[in-house]
């Protein structure tokens, strides 16, 4: 089984460069056929504080988990 991965990326992150970390993780995971969903938040830094409201994230995770497990 493949574990679903949800990423929330702050595109203005100066601590962990998005291209070298979050985007790379997403591409690698997708290349293995794993379920990945990326939310990119323009202007947000290292702690983008999730998605508000979190409905879209919750719905995606529930669907992904049901499909994989």
Image: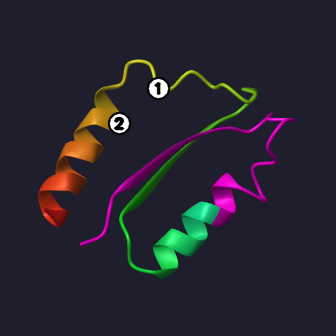
Measuring 28% from the left and 45% from the top, which residue is drawn there? 60
| Quadrant the N terminus occupies | bottom left
Q: Residue furthest bottom?
A: 32
Q: Is residue 15 above or below residue 26?
A: above
**59 drawn magenta:** no
The quarter holding residue 46 reads: top right
Q: Residue 45 placed where, x, y %?
A: 75, 27
| Quadrant the C terminus occupies | bottom left
Measuring 80% from the left and 34% from the top, which residue is drawn there? 12
Measuring 84% from the left and 36% from the top, which residue is drawn there? 15
Residues at badges 2 and 1 in contact (C-beta under 8 Å)? yes
Relative placement, left or right, of 48 versus 2 is right
Q: Earlier in the sequence, mark 2 or mark 1?
A: 1
Residue on which disc 1 sits: 51
Q: Residue 32 placed where, x, y %?
A: 45, 81
> Magenta region: which residues?
1-24
Q: Is residue 6 above or below residue 42?
A: below
Measuring 32% from the left and 34% from the top, which residue is drawn there? 56
Residue on which disc 2 sits: 57
Secondary structure under badge 2? helix
Relative placement, left or right, of 63 versus 28 is left
Q: Is residue 2 above or below residue 4?
A: below
**16 drawn magenta:** yes
Magenta portion: prevailing SS class: loop
Q: Residue 58 placed where, x, y %?
A: 27, 34
In-front residue for pair 21/10? 21
The quarter holding residue 66 reads: bottom left
């Amino acid at each position: 089984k493949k574990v679903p991965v949800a990423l929330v990326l702050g595109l203005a992150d100066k601590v962990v460069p998005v291209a070298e970390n979050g985007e790379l993780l997403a591409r690698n995971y997708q290349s293995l056929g794993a379920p990945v969903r990326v939310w990119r938040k323009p202007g947000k830094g290292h702690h983008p504080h999730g998605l508000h409201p979190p409905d879209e994230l919750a719905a995606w995770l529930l669907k992904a988990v049901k499909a994989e497990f």
